[in-house]
Image (cartoon, helix red, strand yellow):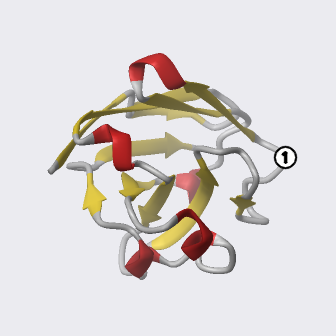
Amino acid sequence: QVQLIESGGGLVQAGGSLRLSCAASGRTVRLHAMAWFRQRPGKEREPVVAFTWSGNNAFYADSVKSRVTIVRDNGKNTAYLQMNSLRPEDTAVYYCAVGTRNPTFYGDRISDKDAYDYWGQGTQVTVSS
């Protein structure tokens, strides 16, 4: 089992920044991929960023690509999603997820929510205009 603890959401004005964190504990030796998804009101859950722990593959949604940075702390099994220049349309519940399947599995499925095995509780990000 893997447990994920998320933090860092909140209310911010448009143009502001937030940093989300996701800390994994438990059977972390099997972590091969991590991702953030978000679910905006009335919308399907969508991928925001995803990466393999090996560093050989990553995904960034076009809508956030120039505005986000991922920082990993391998020793703590923690990753941080730094989001800048936030927009009202970024308002959503953000979910961290990890995948424990064979690393090659995430070659072309890294942004597929069904490829992830454990999910955090979600954190609300609200961007006011």
What's under tag 1, amino acid-wise?
A: Ser
Residue at the spot of label 1: 66
Residue at 59% across / 59% down in the picture?
48
For the C terminus, the image quarter is top right
Q: Which image quadrant for residue 78?
A: top left
Relative height, residue 19 to residue 50 (above, below): above
* Residue 39 percent across, percent down from the top left: 40, 67
Relative height, residue 70 to residue 123 (above, below): above
* Numbered disc 1: secondary structure: loop
Foreground residue among 112 and 53: 53
Foreground residue among 5 and 105: 105
Foreground residue among 80 and 94: 80
Relative height, residue 64 to residue 74 (above, below): below
* Residue 33 percent across, percent down from the top left: 51, 54
Side of 48 relative to 29 (left or right): right
Residue at 26% across / 59% down in the picture?
118
Side of 79 relative to 114 (left or right): right
Query: Quick one: which residue is furthest to the left in this view?
Result: 1
